[in-house]
Image (cartoon, helix red, strand yellow):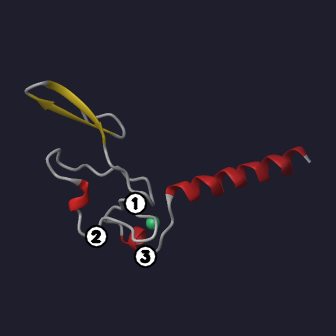
């Protein structure tokens, strides 16, 4: 999309171009495109009660708390495991 960078919302306003962080789903990392005047906290079901992160409309993200951070930790661990297996 023109004028849109990954993870950043670009708004053309009277004061010029404003770049702001687009909220990403705390569980799957999906970038949610919210209108600039719309507060992310206004999403009725958009917040996980467990990790208190904003989550997207994906049903899987509402089923259980599986934060992106934990996923990354897991991937890192798997990568280290793979590394140790390869070197060993
Ligand atoms: Zn999600
Ligand atoms: Zn969560």
Number of marks drawn: 3
Q: Position of residue 51 (x, y in %)?
A: 46, 65
Which residue does the image show at 76% across and 49% down from the upper left? 80
Q: Secondary structure at mark 2?
A: loop
Q: Secondary structure at mark 1?
A: loop
Q: Tell me the distance, in whole angstroms, between the alpha carbons under discs 1 and 3.
A: 14 Å
Q: Where, quadrant-wise, is the N terminus in this rendering? A: top left
Say above or below: 38 vs 55: above
Q: Is the Cβ of the residue at disc 2 closer than 8 Å to that at disc 1?
A: no
Q: Which residue is mark 3?
A: 63
Residue placed furthest toward the left = 14
> Does the numbered disc 3 mark a residue whose Cβ is under 8 Å from ligand 2?
no
* Quarter where residue 2 is shown: top left
- Mark 1 burial class by Cα count in 10 Å: few <14, some 14-19, many 20+: some
Residue placed furthest toward the top = 16
Q: Which residue is mark 2?
A: 45
Q: Which residue is mark 1?
A: 53
Query: Which residue is more in the foreground, 20 or 84?
Result: 20
Q: Is residue 67 left or right of residue 46?
A: right
Q: Do we see residue 3 in this rendering? A: no
Q: Within the displayed image, which quadrant is ligand 1 positioned in? A: bottom left
Q: Position of residue 69 (x, y in %)?
A: 54, 54
Q: Tell me the distance, in whole angstroms, between the alpha carbons under discs 2 and 1.
A: 11 Å
> Does the numbered disc 1 mark a residue whose Cβ is under 8 Å from ligand 2?
yes
Q: Is residue 86 left or right of residue 10?
A: right
Q: Is residue 27 left or right of residue 24?
A: right
Q: Secondary structure at mark 3?
A: helix
């Amino acid at each position: 999309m023109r004028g849109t960078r990954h993870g950043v919302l670009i708004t053309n306003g009277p004061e010029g171009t404003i770049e702001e962080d687009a909220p990403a789903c705390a569980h799957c990392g999906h970038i949610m495109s919210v209108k600039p005047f719309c507060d992310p906290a206004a999403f009725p079901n958009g917040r996980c009660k467990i990790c208190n992160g904003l989550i997207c409309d994906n049903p899987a993200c509402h089923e259980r708390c599986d934060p992106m951070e934990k996923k990354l930790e897991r991937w890192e661990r798997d990568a280290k495991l793979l590394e140790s297996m390869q070197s060993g």
